[in-house]
Image (tube, rainbow, N blue to C red):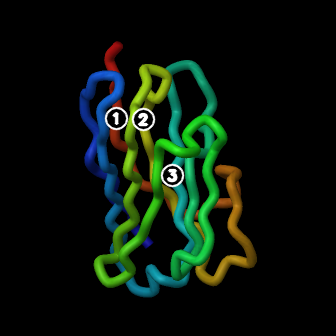
């Protein structure tokens, strides 16, 4: 599966952005999907994940209550709605896929097999 992330940009603190990740290839619905981010000089970190068919979600503590992950299998797309953005949310955001038919929802980068190219989010104070 190939992934293409989009939707990043520059936003003021308190604002919102919605990231999209379009997947090519068949069987998108058999993959768990995740969002990760990497700020300059820092390691890539988990943001959110959603299971195949959207039955389960997981969020990093730092984004709980502000970010929402969702998926539309008919459009082969996963979304990350980001509200109440903070300057510390500034990073390059990557979408990733784990599967097909993964055993469980995971949150570590090395468990994901496919990665998009990243989209940059900058939150100004």
Identify the residue under disc 1.
120
As drawn, which residue projects farthest toward the top? 125
Instruction: Tell me where residue 57 appears, x and y as whole percent.
Output: 60, 64
Q: Quadrant of the C terminus?
A: top left
Instruction: Tell me where residue 58 appears, x and y as whole percent.
Output: 63, 57
Q: Earlier in the sequence, mark 1 or mark 2?
A: 2
Q: Which mark is residue 30?
A: none
Task: Note whether 103 is above or below 22 in the view shown.
Answer: below
Q: Earlier in the sequence, mark 1 or mark 3?
A: 3
Identify the residue under disc 3.
35
Observer-nearest residue: 114 or 80?
Answer: 80
Label 2 element class: strand
Circles 1 and 3: CB distance less than 8 Å? Answer: no
Identify the residue under disc 2.
92
Observer-nearest residue: 15 or 104?
Answer: 15
Instruction: Tell me where residue 114 appears, x and y as whole percent.
Output: 52, 62
Label 3 element class: strand
Circles 1 and 2: CB distance less than 8 Å? Answer: yes
């Amino acid at each position: 599966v190939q992934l293409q992330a989009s939707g990043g940009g520059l936003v003021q603190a308190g604002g919102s952005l919605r990231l999209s990740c379009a997947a090519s290839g068949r069987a998108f619905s058999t993959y768990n999907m995740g969002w990760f981010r990497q700020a300059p000089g820092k390691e890539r970190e988990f943001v959110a994940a959603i299971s195949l068919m959207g039955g389960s979600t997981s969020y990093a503590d730092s984004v709980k209550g502000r970010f929402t992950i969702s998926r539309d299998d008919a459009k082969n797309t996963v979304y990350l709605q980001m509200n109440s953005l903070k300057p510390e949310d500034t990073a390059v955001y990557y979408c990733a896929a784990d599967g097909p038919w993964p055993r469980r929802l995971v949150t570590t980068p090395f468990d994901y097999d496919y990665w998009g190219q990243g989209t940059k989010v900058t939150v100004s104070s």
